[in-house]
Amino acid sequence: MVKKYTSMAYANADELIFGKSKFPVKAGLGLEIGAGYTSPEVNYAPRPEAGKSKEKLVKEYERITTDIMARMVQIGAPSVVLETEHVQQMSNHPSWGAAVAHAQKTIMEEYHDEYGIKCALRHTIGDIREDRDFLDLRGGDKYNTFLEAFEQCAKSGADLLSVESMGGKEVFDYSILRNDTAGILFGIGVLGSMDMEMVWSDIAAIAKRTGTVAAGDTDCAQANTAMFIAGGLLDKNLAHTTAIVARAISAARSLCAYEAGAQGPGKDCGYENSIIKAIAGVPITQEGKTSTCAHSDLMGNLVMQCCDLWSNESVEYHGEFGGTTVQCWSETLAYDCSMMNVALKTGKAKDLRDILVLSDKYRDPQGYVLAYDNAYKVGQAIAKNGNDNYLRAKAAAIECCNIIESGVNSGKLRLTRFETNALAKVKADLVALTDDADKFMSDNLTKFKQEVAVFRPENYGL
Amino acid sequence: MLDLKLEDVDGILVRYNVALEKEMTPDEAAEELYPKDKLVYPIAKAIYEGEEDDVIEGLEAAIKAGKKPIDLIDDALMIGMGVVTRLYDDGIIFLPNVMMSADAMLAGIEFCKSQTTEVPEAKGKVVCHVAEGDVHDIGKNIVVALLRANGYDVVDLGRDVPVDEVINAVVENKPIMVTGTALMTTTMYAFKEVNDKLLEKGIKIPFACGGGAVNQDFVSQYELGVYGEEAADAPKIADAIVSGIKDIAALREEFHKH
């Protein structure tokens, strides 16, 4: 049984700041994350043809790693983290992922030895636990291979272990396209949390065994899907008020990793990470304006507010005028980190944080809720109900609705009529839900077994 | 914490979606578009509202009044869905409304088929798949729903589909186009293989591709590729093909936005 968070790591929202976390994490070669400075975390994807063979992939990652380390040294960056998000071949064949980790770490060690640059390597294992038609989350060969990929990468050079786990996605995908609030809550807050507890208990055990760090998860598969479908101001695919409710719920879900033994830093695309930092005090990675190479969001500055690592999400490796993409983006990240680190050294960090937040806070309801003062309130709602996955997810969702309403009442956050109606619907749905977690489980199991053909309760031990 | 004065917010950002929101509510806009026929109106409205039970009820009433089930597909269900897709294209309603309407329409089509031995005629057949090695299928599911909502017969091969399975499905079904979606840079490479194997067999049909890491430059690298930036482009590309634009270059000219 994992220990659940029922209190906040920070006494108040104002304590949340970039570069500092309550529980810094030592990792890799001389790096300490959240210990008073920020570092860039560079993420990349190999060119399409590189996946043809193990040798091609390893060579591609060697080029990527060398390019980044060389550029960091060329511009005088004191520290850097590299994140390798596995392509499926690297996780389905753990020896491939291990070979890449070993090759990357060898290069990083050379740079560390020669220049003293602090660095660490994150490997994000692909969630390969599925076959063509169904999720295959627990037991069996898929799960064994999944864990083996963590183990081999950890033993071969990866310092930080992560995954973007997919528990609950089959129900979520169906529900988000049908405005089904209970289904969104069930998919992320209940099923997602149950899967997280299992997965992260096992990853934490591997990290302990191998002397590496169980770093954390992100609700990329669900809350980010909602955010991407929601899109920009003029997109008409999903109300942004609905998308941020999914995000608030995801904080309750992603917290499960830390309750199961993860230490941080949580992954870059976990926009829920500010809420998690407020509750758990773990360091976090974030991405914003520097991830425009991968996707657009509506809070490019705001999410920098309390990051410990600052990321670009992902960029395909290829040439640009200024070098390769990884060189260009690592340099951009490093200069942002330099700015934050100066603010920390000169006592101006809170001013910079607030400027970053205010540049986006009223741009969209999503950024409004994730602004650190409001993120803290969502965290409090979760912690207050911390012992029950369902109740805390529901509390986060309701608090999210309340926060948006107060923003609207202030006159500063403006919603379209459509967003207002969607918010009213979500809130009414949430308020009407039972407070009995067992009944919620039973009702939704029955419903989604009927409605979602690919939903298999046995994936959750049900 | 620092905060902005109310009057300063506008100088920092513009909520264009609030500033430009249409006056008419979605329900009012839909009401203007419904057909006036007393038997068709409730079916079209039930489609718009995504109410499957009401769709069936409306169909039963229309059949009882003498309408042929097979005709109701085009004359009622597709009309109702036409209202929905027009409102979506005009930015008046959002995607979940379309998905729920599509569910209701498909339930209606199944009901009509169960009431007759006649076989409905689709606008055309489309084969849809997610690239081999890729299991991210929400985009494909939206594409499938939108194509069906627009009257196309979709052969949905699902996700992580081996290249040869795509080719076999094309040979067997003779579609007007194939769609492929992918999230990862490494899995989208399978699109090139699909393209090459189709050409080997002498099949030259548009291969509409899109999704996460897929971009126009990549899709333009293979002969049959047509890039769709949004899921809603899929039925538009299909409509263009049905209208006679089968040349890949012409389709690219129309749909490649960058």
Image (tube, rainbow, N blue to C red):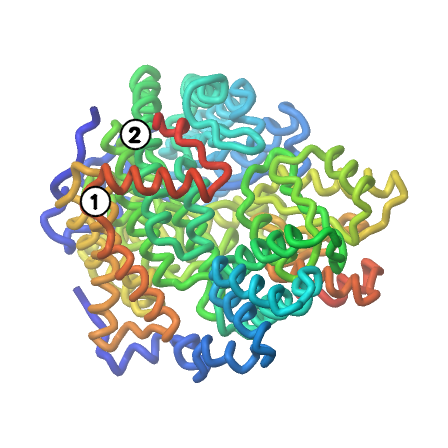
Instruction: Tell me where residue A109 appears, x and y as whole percent.
Output: 44, 25
Name above or below for residue A460 compared with residue A345: above
Q: Residue at x 52, y 34 (%)?
A: A65
Q: Is residue B218 left or right of residue A254?
A: right
* Helix, strand or loop for disc 1: helix
**Outermost residue, left side:** A11
Whether pointer 1 and pointer 2 mark residues with C-beta atoms closer than 8 Å, the reply is no
Residue B149 appears in the picture as rendered? yes
Hey, what amino acid is under mark 1? Arg
Hey, what amino acid is under mark 2? Glu
Instruction: Tell me where residue B132 appears, x and y as whole percent.
Output: 65, 35
Q: Which residue is mark 1?
A: A392
Q: Residue at x 26, y 51 (%)?
A: A306
Instruction: Tell me where residue B211 appears, x and y as whole percent.
Output: 59, 50
Q: Which residue is mark 2?
A: A197
Name above or below for residue B122 compared with residue B257: above
Q: Which mark is residue A226?
A: none
Q: Is residue B207 left or right of residue B24?
A: right
Q: Residue at x 75, y 54 (%)?
A: B118
Crowding at dot 1, Cα within 10 Å, few <14 / some 14-19 / many 20+, comes out as many
- Which quadrant of the view contains residue A216? top left
Which comes before the other along the chain, label 1 or label 2? Answer: 2
